[in-house]
Image (tube, coloured by chain):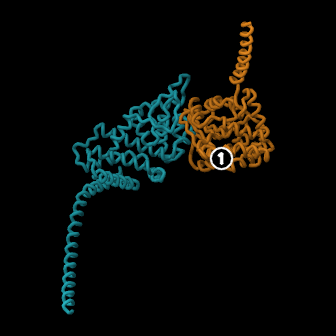
Chain colours: A orange, B cyan
Amino acid sequence: MALRYLSSRMTLGSRILSYRSSLASLHSHATSFGFQQVREEEKSKLVGNVFTNVASSYDIMNDVMSAGLHRLWKERLVGKLSPFAGMKHLDVAGGTGDVAFRIFDAFNSVKRRALRKVDEASHEETQIYVCDINPNMLNVGKQRAAERGLSDNRSLVWVEGDAEALSFDDNSMDGYTIAFGIRNVTHIEKAIAEAYRVLKRGGRFLCLELSHVDIPVFKELYDLYSFQVIPNLGELIAGDRDSYQYLVESVRRFPPQERFAKMIGDAGFEKVEYENLVGGVVAIHSAIKL
Amino acid sequence: MYRTAAKRLLGAGLTTSRLLRSPKLTSSTTIPSSHTSNLCTSSMGHTESPISNQSGPTSAGEGPRRKPRPEFQEEQARVLSASLRHVARLGWTEEAMMAGSRDVGVSPSIVGSFSRKEAALVEYFMDECLQLLVDRVDSGLDLQNLIPSERISKLVRVRLEMQVPYMSKWPQALSIQAHPVNVPTSFKQRAMLVDEMWHAVGDGASDLDWYVKRTVLGGVYSTTEIYMLTDDSPEYRETWEFLDDRVKDAFDLKKSIQEAKYFAQDIGAGVGKLFQGLMNGVMQSMSTRGGRSSSAF
């Protein structure tokens, strides 16, 4: 009887154990999708769904959610690059082309100035690659390019690809930017490692991302805005509350500025710095590969 | 004063940093303000500048054996040093820095990471020149047989001659240094330069005279520098004559200040006596008039 009691205890224990182990197996290959825990294989599919849903209203929603500020943030990001003739730039997760167009404009104005100066090494052509995992986002980008009359321009190249497994050669890019994309990646370290791989020596890594606010009162206001206002806006404008709920939750799950900077440094980058905009709502991390 | 401060800094191994560093790298001191960091690298760098010249062409092709990852500051210094070769043609500009970075085998994107880009190049050059000057003085620039005014002349001349290769673009460098954003650093660099020069002359005073001396020498140096911009005499002969005259004036200035002080005292005494005389006269006339009127009652 004692044995049966013991065995029943054990089965109970083992049930708990098995529950724990299954939970453990869930955790060992689990990642976050907003505040939910999901399996890694599912995350990219779920993210894919989110962006397929939001693609057409992505730009409008950006304007509404950030009250147009996202344009200033992207200007600031591009301002930190110094484009030059013959530059090869990669913009990852840049589906609708916001950052790419800005770099293109910046480069063109620089080129016109630099044409007056003699520069032997500028025989190579500037290339701006826009890489996105989601074809819908890329299509929106291509459409916008057509609207600007740039559809035949050889400088802009639209590539479908995964930030964790880029199809570009080692040491081939002078610049790498990722704007509001890295928090959607399943393995952030892999994306950073890929960035390190494709950059040339002296190449710059720039990441613009929603980040953590520490300022006391502002933090509460920001949380209120994020969780109460944005999903409702998503419902109203894009007809998709869940995607925007995911968006807001994924921001909270993303590592804070210092930890992300450490991750970048661990991948081998040098001179890792970050700049907080709007009190930490957005942060631009920059680094150099040497 | 600056020299001792710099020695203290280097000795203590200051480690403040806004920059995060990968833990894998050997740590070295990282100092936020650009000029002191350049001073560190340049003071360590004068031993490694011959090395960097040799490793310059080889750094482009690394081959299967990866050499240890260079310190970021060294790499920056190397890019800046290579950029100086292009300044005569391209000016103190980003293009020169990009050309320099290509020489070293690094992507020109690195230029985007320099804060105040062209100013970084100019400040690097100023630091290099200061270091060269210190080296020349230490390695026996003959100053013993000269009187102080001649020593000053020689030091300023040695320093200004370092700028001769860049003379065509020096006005641009001066305008970059005069930018409000860059003024703090350029002012500090010039102050250090002047301090070094007085130190080499052998002056160790630390009273009020210290400020006067440095200001005066700063003025002499700047005016000579600007005169040199428009001088096309062979080997800048006229500039050196101008310099000698200014130094003489500066040394005479001390005497002139004394003379002016005595002169002012004399005048003051004279005026004072005049005023006193006047006051006495007035008082007297008032008292007699008052006496006469009081006697009327």
Residue visible at 53% across and 38% down? B101
Quadrant of the image occupied by residue A240: top right
Q: Nearer the viewer, residue A162 or A246?
A: A246
Residue B7: percent from left, percent from top: 35, 37
Q: Is residue A17 above or below residue A35?
A: above
Q: On the picture, is B56 further left or further right than B190?
A: right
**Where the C terminus of chain B falls, by quadrant?**
bottom left
Q: Nearer the viewer, residue B4 or B283?
A: B283
User: Can the viewer see residue B229?
Assistant: yes
Q: On the picture, is A140 further left or further right than A192?
A: right
Tally the numbered discs.
Answer: 1
Q: Nearer the viewer, residue B159 or A180?
A: A180
Residue visible at 22% across and 58% down? B255
Q: On the picture, is B200 further left or further right than B79?
A: left
- Furthest-bottom residue in view? B296
Residue visible at 30% across and 40% down? B137
Q: Residues within 10 Å of mark 1 (few under 14, many from 20)?
A: few
Residue B256: percent from left, percent from top: 24, 60
Q: Nearer the viewer, residue B48 or B276?
A: B276
Q: Is residue B158 above or below residue B243?
A: above
Helix, strand or loop at mark 1: helix
Residue B103: percent from left, percent from top: 52, 36
List the residue tagged with mark 1. A221
- Furthest-front residue in view? A1
**Amino acid type assigned to the residue bearing label 1 in the image:** Leu
Residue visible at 56% across and 42% down? B112
